Image (cartoon, rainbow, N blue to C red):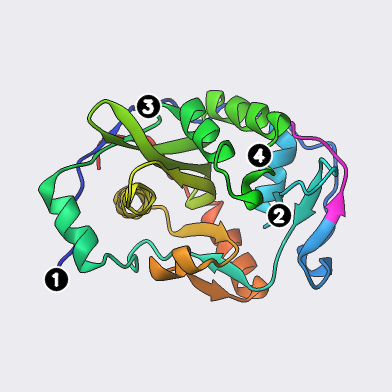
Amino acid sequence: MSQPALDVMVAPAPQPSPVGPCRFHFPDPREADADGLLATGGDLEPATLLAAYRQGVFPWPAADIELLWWSPDPRAVLPPDGVHVSRSLARRLRRGAFRVTIDAAFDDVVAGCADRPAADETWITPAIRDAYARLHRLGWAHSVEVWVGGALAGGLYGVSIGALFAAESMFHRVTDASKVALVALAQHARAVGVQLVDVQMPTPHLQSMGAVTISRDEYLAALALAVTRPVNFTGGRS
């Protein structure tokens, strides 16, 4: 069964704004411990966050420690051409119950991710929310919104650098809405030339949608190529 195409409305935006050099030096990601923890400290300035992503590192606060930096091995990625759409989800997509946009409600998507009741979502602290909102204003962070009627039903957000999209979190208020967001992200990634969709850690939900794990070395090799390729993530309509 072929995947139904989604009509994804994208708000065109200028190229991302320069952020200047990072004032910190991240260790080699291969020095991370068995859990993937690489470093502590630093800040959440745009230059710091973008330097981290370019090196295969991401922030993930835990407990009362605000700044922890991670590079897990293995790494979970979502192949843009390998997303799995179940028969039931395909039927829902064909019925046209969902409307999908990109960058129409970034702050609302991050708030939806932060408000999830699951304990593993408590890492989206006020500082994290402010940091990614700033990245969004600078043109580096983007959201995928899924709507039912006029209400936000689900979505995801992440950071785009070249042909990398580093997905950070997703949520749903309506059944299948987060799955629709992933399908839309993969479709848009293919359309604009994103080659590497990083989803960080494998979960049963992500694996059911086609996410796979690769070694840290494989990830870093793919990342080195992806971040150098010119991709305009909001370049139009997919």
Three-letter residue code for mark 3: Ala
What residue appears at the point 78 percent right and 37 percent down from the top-left corner? 22
Q: Is residue 4 visible?
A: no
Label 3, label 4: how many angstroms apart (C-alpha)? 20 Å
Three-letter residue code for mark 2: Val
Would residue 41 be found to the left or right of residue 4 on screen? right
Instruction: Classify 10 Å Cα crowding around label 4: few (below 14), some (14-19), many (20 and above).
Output: many
Q: Nearer the viewer, residue 8 or 163?
A: 8
Instruction: Classify 10 Å Cα crowding around label 3: few (below 14), some (14-19), many (20 and above).
Output: some
Q: What is the span of residues highlighted in magenta in the rendered image?
A: 39-45
- Vertical arrangement, residue 227 with respect to residue 233, above or below: below
Secondary structure state at the residue bearing disc 4: loop
Label pair 3/2, CB-CB below 8 angstroms: no
Q: Which residue is labeled 3 in the image?
A: 104
x, y percent for residue 143 = 44, 37
Three-letter residue code for mark 1: Met
Q: Nearer the viewer, residue 134 or 90?
A: 90
| Foreground label between 3 and 4 | 4
Q: Main secondary structure of the magenta part?
A: loop
Q: Which residue is labeled 2 in the image?
A: 57
User: Which of the numbered marks, if any, corresponds to residue 187?
Assistant: none
| Foreground label between 3 and 2 | 3
| Image quarter in which the N terminus is found | bottom left
